[in-house]
Image: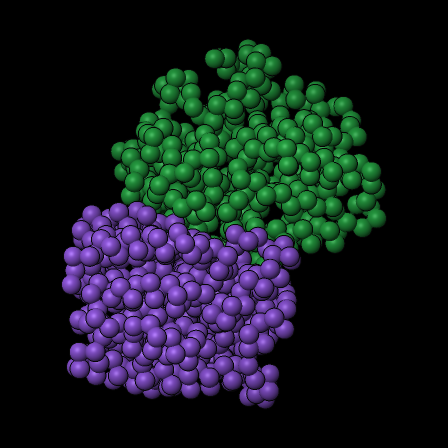
Chain colours: A green, B purple
Amino acid sequence: MTKIDTHSDPNELLDLLLEESTLKGAERFHRYPERKFFGYFCSYFPEELILAAGLDPLRLFPDSENSTPAELPAYSCSLARGTLDMEIREQWQDLVGIGFTHTCDTMQCLSGIWAASGHSKTIDIVPPVMLTAQGASRYYQSELNNLIKELTALTQQDITQQALQDALLLCAHTRNLVTELDTLRPNLPSPLVFAILRAGQLMPRADYVKALEQCLPALKDMAVTPHTRAKLLITSAVLENDSLFTMIEDLGGRVVADDTCSGYRHYSGHTLTESGDPLSDIIKRYSGMPSCPCKNRSLNERISYLSGLAKQRDAQGAIIVIRKYCEPHAWDAVTLAETFRNNGIRTLTLELEGANVGGQERTRLQAFIESLSEAPELSKEG
Amino acid sequence: MPDAQSTKHNEHAKKRNYRPLVSTKALQKTMGRYYAITNYHRYWGKPLRRPLAWVTSGAPVELLRAFKIHSAYPEQYAAIYSARQATVSLCEVAETAGYSQDLCSYARSNIGGVLRPDLAPLGGMPKPDLLVACNNICGTVLKWYEVLARHFNVPLLVLDTPFLTGELTPQAKEYVLEQLNAMAVDLEKITGRKLNQQSLAEQMRRSAEITSLWKETRQYCQASPSPLNAPDLFIHMAPIVVLRGSQEGINYYRKLEAEVKERVKLGQGAVNNERIRLVWDNIAIWPQLFSFYKLFAEKGACFVTDTYSGGWAADHAPGTPMESLAATYTEVFLNRSPEYRANQLINQIRDYKAHGFVMHSNRSCKPYSLVQEVIRRKVMRETGVPGLMIEADMADPRAYAEEPVRNRVQAFLETFDDLT
């Protein structure tokens, strides 16, 4: 494995990030034997606290989208089925623990099923759903304090204010680096950016930051070439591989705005670090970040945010991905599609069983992207 | 729950090995009045300054009643749509509008009814002045009510009740209480009325009374033979849902309780020659309400209790009215861990001396259904009684495969052949 230091070759480091994004943590035991990983599912699990506990966050992605563990009915999403199946096959047994956040109904249920049938120690956090409701911040603070207690009990090690502040700074730095990369996105291959973002959720955080810091200049050099590709916004739940992004690129599209759970949305939002109260800063970040459909800041905020993002990135088209049985995204899809269309942005709603795309999706994407290429001024006509 | 089914229920009962309830007539009258008042709201709502709210089944309706708000329940109308075989056409309207077939069938048929009221039984629901959702039953209600709020352009008030992985925590209770106080302020603005604490206390008193009556009525089913079967419970739960906190509801349940008590005294079972006692888990299969439960009744199997209609039989939490509302609505069983729900089922099996249980794996209700397999295993392990899983949908008949269901039910009931 490539050693990460100031003398490392940026190209090799880039290869490392891409490799990590493909491995999805499968080699963690061999690559990082001295590290302790803590698994989590949703972007609303505060990774600052995992880091402050001396652990490295590992986002759990399924190794198959066809798993059918007996503990879950077939009408559950493949993310839940796949990761639970891996738990039953003891694929996560080296993790110090696994954190669940109450976001969607499936995640809420998965936590209980996992505790009943799995082998790993589980920890729950139930953040507010209504992020601006009366008392939400105070309640959130209490939940974070509980989480700190649970993580402390798990590691038998106190989480100090200093450790919290350091973790906060590390996360802020990570998000800044990723945001820098996100601004280069229009001029970089879509699967490349998506993979780099995913790697940050799968490898030791400090290593990721070092690698990304050193790769960024090379990525900036790569990003100077103008292109004539169809500019797309994509919104989705978790996508555990680059299949869709690769197909989009192959068909002449370019993802200029990424609102996927495992893509840029995971890093988005402003991270405060200087209030002197790390928990308060953490709450502000998670409450203020562009929300997933499970959360509500106000009735139309998510819709307006995505419309604004499409406009800001000059997107010609939008792809709304609904993972089979993912209800929150399926609900928002209708209003989102209508809003995009009203704003002159052509929209394709794509239902996927898992993250992989095949022949049927290719046909639809091809027709969609071709229609954009034929009407490059569409967004201005709207 | 759908009263419209009650006449049909009695007709079928005669043919199908179970005893009809005399109270059904009172139920029809009570619910008929409620629907008439609701459907004519446009004529009396404004003059009386009484807005119409569409509310979720787990919303703190006592608070709304204190503001003289009239509540209508999309979930309840959706059950009626289903019992009247209108769900498929209404869901297709929603699906054509872009709503995935995998979304909750109550929500889809409700949206279908909003878009095409001409296809909906009862002419659909009257337009709301406000929407009140509480996410103690699922996350779907938030998304569903967001859609409605955009469509009708009316205020949406949401009560966020944190999911309880264990017991209710002080911070969760405090958070819900703060939201209830904020909701009261919003309702003051919407209705132009001040919150009357005495009126709220009176609503809570009536709500507690109706809950007690429903609870006591259900407990009579611990007798053998059981005076009620699952379809009775599902149909006669309608007032506890929509008339919680009302005197009409109390009057109705007094009648029902008296009849059920009399049945026990006379040793009359809901199912003739009751042989097998079962517990039901999940929402009813509304479109197959009679044909499905007939499979059991004709073999002498009676569902003596259930987790679904039992959800409205939970005692009110102590405290001031607002504190009681905060705890009671956060602690509803669907907002709790699989462990809690397994223990609840275990207790029901023991208290009602059940021989087995049947779980409806309901495609439309993930919080109810996804955890059922781990619950089934635990309950079987701890009680030693068998549990059957049936996959269907509470409202959409397209998810009901008759032959496989019949085969599974028959095989399950054969395991009780030694019971006489």
Judge left or right: residue B376 versus residue A210.
left
Q: Is residue B46 above or below residue B145?
A: below
> What quarter of the picture does the C terminus of chain B occupy?
bottom left
Position in image of residue B270 (x %, y %): 26, 74
Residue at point 55%, 30% (across, down): A241
Residue at x 31% of width, y 81% of height: B21
Task: Tell which of B329 and B200 is nearer to you.
Answer: B329
Residue drawn at the location 43% of the way across and 44% of the way down? A74
Task: Residue B326: give x, y in percent of width and height.
Answer: 36, 66
Query: Could one spot residue A88 in this view of the protein?
Result: yes
Asked whether residue B199 is in view, the answer is no
A292 relative position to B267: left or right? right
**What is the quadrant of the N terminus of chain B in the image?**
bottom left
Specify the quadrant of the image occupied by residue A158. top left
Vertical placement of A67 versus B163: above or below?
above
Position of A259 compared to A148: left or right? right
Query: In this picture, is A100 found above or below B331?
Result: above
Which residue is depicted at the point 46% across and 39% down?
A79
Choose top left, top right, bottom left or bottom right for residue B286: bottom left
